[in-house]
Amino acid sequence: MAGRREDSHFALTDMHLSCATGAPNGCVRASAGPRFGLWDADRSRSVTRGQLMAVAKKKPAAPPAEPAKPKPASSVPDLGKERELKAFREMLLIRRFEEKAGQMYGMGLIGGFCHLYIGQEAVVVGMQMAIKEGDQVITGYRDHGHMLACGMDPKGVMAELTGRRNGYSKGKGGSMHMFSVARNFYGGHGIVAAQVSLGTGLAFANRYRKNDNVSLTYFGDGAANQGQVYESFNMAELWKLPVVYIVENNRYAMGTSVSRASAQTDFSKRGASFDIPGEQVDGMDVRAVKAAGERAVKWAREGNGPYILEMMTYRYRGHSMSDPAKYRTREEVEKVRTEHDPIEQVRARMLASKRASEEILKAVDAEIRKIVNEAAEFATHDPEPDPAELWTDITR
Ligand SMILES: Cc1ncc(C[n+]2csc(CCOP(=O)(O)OP(=O)(O)O)c2C)c(N)n1
Ligand SMILES: [Mg+2]
């Protein structure tokens, strides 16, 4: 489309710059300004002063006073030595697992859809650090990282990917359809945004059963444009349901960049008309994710209703294994990898602060590789389901 640039995430165009500096063409910056370098250009969409005035004039009188919304922390709190090492280990488990899944897909051992989470690990690991036992997790099809972070067995997850009988869905579900009620993981959903209404339902169940659990409901930037998301927002706020909506904004929905698909690219504001508070979080920094997660979960657990966290993140691999990723440049991916990688950030910080030595971190990597290799071995030799199983587990 004329005037829109696919590669404009890293650099302001001339038009954006002239608008931002108050050039005579009458443009003003529409948003509060950039907070994350990676995302600056997305924030630079402009509207004319006349358009803004027209919208402003239509505004109704201010609503009655509401309870104070929690404020984002100004600085990123330290995790402490043990937690930092734990975060490193858990993110590395997801990274190595996904690398292995990618290899096995290439070898023909995994078939069907397979969406890798590489690059986004800090989101789910940081959020898990903010919840307690009994809180539920639900997500879309990019789900292997969520399952591992919930404590599901890598062998069972990998065996499901290879379609074997000891997989989490007995080899009949595959990558997008795994569940573990024991680990409070509710899937694994292939229909974009379907999990948002289900996650809201989990929160409703918590309220109905009068427990104090919170539902973490994950979805993507693309899913955020789906109608059922807003029906869910409305009900969740109306009934003050304990749900944290986590938008994993990895900047693309299949091959479509956020700026091409979304009229409002600040997803933390998507709950504004329902009065749901939201904030943007550096989703590549596990410390920032945990801190924001704690604020949001506390808000929901204390009966204040839903909360939106927009995680600014990035996926390094294609949308799925069959994506040639022609909609972005290698340089774009490389820049994020070298400057913002969530695991490398923790590694560098631990080495600099002498919290861990190279030897310790290498030993963690070796231990993780062993776990992942064993999972792959198991998933390769476990038998396929009996053909008679084709007709079971369809309905209860
Ligand atoms: C209802 C529905 N529409 C379309 C699709 C096809 N589809 C699968 S993934 C996807 C993109 C979603 O992107 P996003 O929500 O940003 O998640 P990401 O893949 O980036 O994690 C689309 C359109 C689908 N599965 N379901
Ligand atoms: Mg996306």
Image (spheres, rainbow, N blue to C red):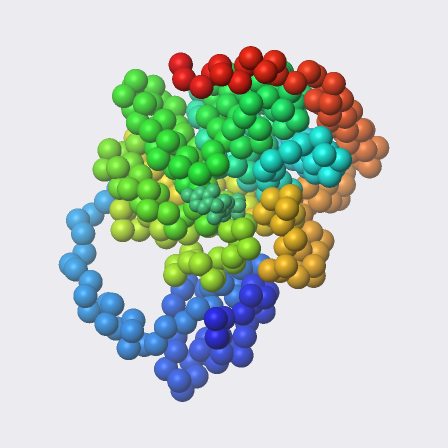
Residue drawn at 43 percent across, 84 percent down: 23
Q: Is residue 306 above or below residue 155?
A: below
Give the residue drawn at x 54%, y 51%.
254
User: Which of the 4 quarters of the picture holds residue 192?
Assistant: top left
Q: Can residue 194 be seen in this view?
A: yes
Numbered disc total:
0
Asked whether 103 or 383 is in front, the reply is 383
Q: Quadrant of the C terminus?
A: top left
Instruction: Give left or right: position of 226 versus 222.
Output: left
- Farthest residue toward the bottom? 24
Residue 258, percent from left and from top: 48, 57
On the image, the x and y values in percent for residue 395 come to 41, 17
Kindly give the residue lying farthest to the front in the view shown.
Answer: 387
- The answer to whether 299 is drawn above or below residue 36 in the figure is above
In the foreground, 287 or 226: 226
Residue 27 on image: x %, y %: 39, 78
Quarter of the rendering containing residue 62: bottom left
The percent coordinates of residue 158 (x first, y second) are 66, 26
Which residue is pictured at 41% across the width and 35% down the height? Answer: 195
Report the side of 183 relative to 68 (left or right). Answer: right
Side of 151 relative to 261 (left or right): right
| 371 w.r.t. 97: above or below | above
Q: In which quarter of the image is residue 5?
A: bottom right
- Residue located at (37% from left, 82% from top): 26
Residue at the right extreme, as displayed? 359
Is residue 276 in view?
A: no
